[in-house]
Image (tube, rainbow, N blue to C red):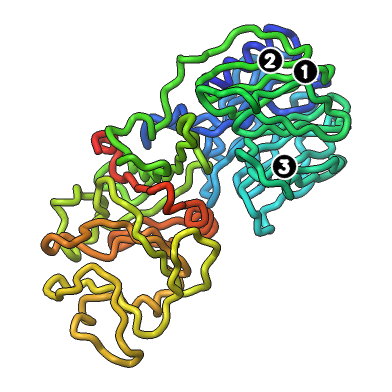
């Protein structure tokens, strides 16, 4: 995907369209296509200097890479934060830039002024991009549902937040005078607001790969769309100057040996067998190919790292590596957060049987409240684990059970430390994933160290 960004940037620089009046970031792209393992820092956004003599690239960590006459003003690469960086925008004089995280947190450097953020808000969908006003006195943030958040002197002209979109919004661009903006969806559908003129879209085209970002010409008479294979689509007075189509590394889901016929796949990719952290990716196949649903998510696994499923045993505090179904029922101490799966709200007497000598090993069991079951000593009283299990999905490892290979492997909320064997996410990420999972699409989870995950 970083090549897709570079292809579009090269086309814009060659065409001489990124002058001081551009006022918008280059495309904010999803990092899946360049991610080739846990050791790779993926580029997710870039923007050019006003004179077109250089550009900045930002990674998911907030690390900044500056080229040409683009000056380095600082980064978030050394900071720890909950949500990845998803894009950036530069000030009109090239003397600074903003970075935006998936929760709408804003990080300003150089002469970029902080004008507000959505970090304190409960967002329906994550932020996916931003654009700045021409005088750098404000900026817009756009969420995956097309919700617009305007700050400083950025005026609100409309959004798609109330619409049912065919595909999520993946980026935006502003007009040269700051009087409007375009939003682009993953299918290339264009939504124009204010003085932004519609010049065409790929909404009716069968794309090889999803659209991941856009940029506008300096006079606002056209725009480019870029796909995650580097393909470029030009409209209006935007000139085609080449593309990187076919040159990009495929998404991680496309590199797997098998997806088990699933149309939804969660991939949990860890750096090594000893790692207690990983990156979680979400992919869906809509019949036209795979696309990435959410930005990569920070995940936590077991305190003793990973083992291949058949090598595990009960209580070894490892996470099983392999490909597994998602259990047919979701559970949680809290109310159903809006899942498509059957959901059971946990009550007193709800247990997960983790006694390998018991006939009900590795299954949900209910006994009368106040009753101590014979398997209690080795099992979890689920209703007492509100911090870990406000809502959760079952990972169908060792089902039906074959020996004491381990039990109770869930996708649940992060509790601030490595798990006993589960995969955990921050609560907002967990809820987003649980709501997305659809039993009709037969979802699976593929998880393990990067060195072996493509063999499952």
Q: Earlier in the sequence, mark 2 or mark 1?
A: 1
Image disc number at residue 151: none
Image disc number at residue 141: 3
Residue 126 coordinates in the image, percent (x, y): 61, 48
Q: Earlier in the sequence, mark 1 or mark 3?
A: 3
Q: Name the mark nearer the viewer: 1 or 3.
A: 1
The residue pinned by badge 1 equals 222
The residue pinned by badge 2 equals 234
Q: Are marks 2 and 3 in contact (CB under 8 Å)?
A: no
Q: Quadrant of residue 144?
A: top right
Residue 286 coordinates in the image, percent (x, y): 49, 36
Q: Secondary structure at mark 3?
A: strand
Judge the density around disc 3: few (<14), some (14-19), many (≥20) Cα neighbours within 10 Å.
many
Q: Quadrant of residue 368?
A: bottom left
The residue shown at (46%, 28%) is: 33
Asked whether 279 or 40 is in front, the reply is 279
Q: Are marks 2 and 1 in contact (CB under 8 Å)?
A: yes
Asked whether 58 or 411 is in front, the reply is 411
The residue shown at (45%, 15%) is: 247
Give the left or right position of residue 278, taking residue 304 as reference: right
Question: Can residue 416 be seen at all in this image of the molecule?
Answer: no
Judge the density around disc 2: few (<14), some (14-19), many (≥20) Cα neighbours within 10 Å.
many
- Decide: is 363 above or below 107: below
């Amino acid at each position: 995907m970083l090549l897709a960004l570079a292809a579009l940037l090269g086309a814009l620089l060659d065409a001489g369209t990124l002058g001081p009046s551009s006022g918008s970031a280059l495309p904010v792209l999803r990092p899946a296509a360049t991610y080739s393992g846990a050791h790779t820092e993926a580029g997710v956004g870039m923007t050019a200097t006003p004179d077109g003599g250089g550009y900045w690239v930002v990674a998911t960590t907030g690390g900044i890479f500056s080229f040409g006459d683009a000056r380095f003003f600082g980064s978030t690469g050394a900071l720890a934060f909950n949500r990845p960086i998803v894009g950036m925008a530069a000030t009109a004089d090239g003397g600074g830039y903003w970075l935006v995280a998936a929760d709408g947190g804003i990080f300003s450097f150089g002469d970029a002024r902080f004008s507000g953020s959505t970090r304190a808000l409960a967002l329906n969908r994550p932020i996916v991009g931003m654009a700045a006003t021409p005088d750098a006195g404000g900026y817009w943030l756009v969420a995956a549902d097309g919700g617009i958040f305007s700050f400083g002197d950025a005026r609100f002209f409309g959004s798609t937040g109330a619409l049912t979109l065919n595909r999520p919004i993946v980026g935006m661009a502003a007009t040269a005078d700051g009087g409007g903006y375009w939003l682009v969806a993953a299918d290339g559908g264009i939504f124009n607001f204010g003085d932004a003129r519609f010049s065409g879209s790929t909404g009716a085209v069968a794309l090889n790969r999803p659209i991941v970002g856009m940029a506008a010409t300096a006079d606002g008479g056209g725009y480019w769309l870029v796909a995650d294979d580097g393909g470029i689509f030009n409209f209006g007075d935007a000139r085609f100057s080449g593309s990187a189509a076919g040159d990009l590394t495929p998404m991680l889901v496309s590199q797997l040996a098998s997806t088990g016929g699933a149309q939804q796949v969660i991939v949990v990719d860890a750096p090594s067998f000893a790692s207690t952290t990983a990156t979680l990716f979400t992919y869906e196949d809509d019949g036209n190919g795979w696309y990435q649903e959410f930005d990569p998510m920070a995940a936590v696994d077991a305190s003793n790292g990973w083992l291949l499923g058949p090598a595990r045993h009960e209580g070894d505090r490892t996470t099983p590596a392999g490909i597994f179904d998602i259990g047919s029922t979701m559970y949680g101490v809290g109310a159903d957060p809006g899942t498509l799966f059957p959901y059971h709200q946990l009550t007193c007497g709800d247990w997960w049987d983790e006694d390998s000598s018991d006939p009900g090993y590795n299954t949900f069991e209910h006994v009368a409240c106040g009753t101590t079951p014979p398997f209690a000593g080795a099992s979890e009283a689920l209703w007492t684990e509100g911090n870990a299990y406000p809502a959760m999905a079952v990972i169908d490892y060792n089902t039906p059970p074959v020996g004491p290979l381990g039990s109770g492997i869930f996708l649940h909320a992060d509790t601030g430390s490595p798990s006993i064997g589960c995969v955990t996410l921050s609560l907002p990420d967990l809820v987003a994933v649980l709501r997305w999972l659809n039993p009709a699409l037969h979802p699976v989870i593929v998880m393990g160290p990067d060195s072996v995950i493509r063999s499952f």
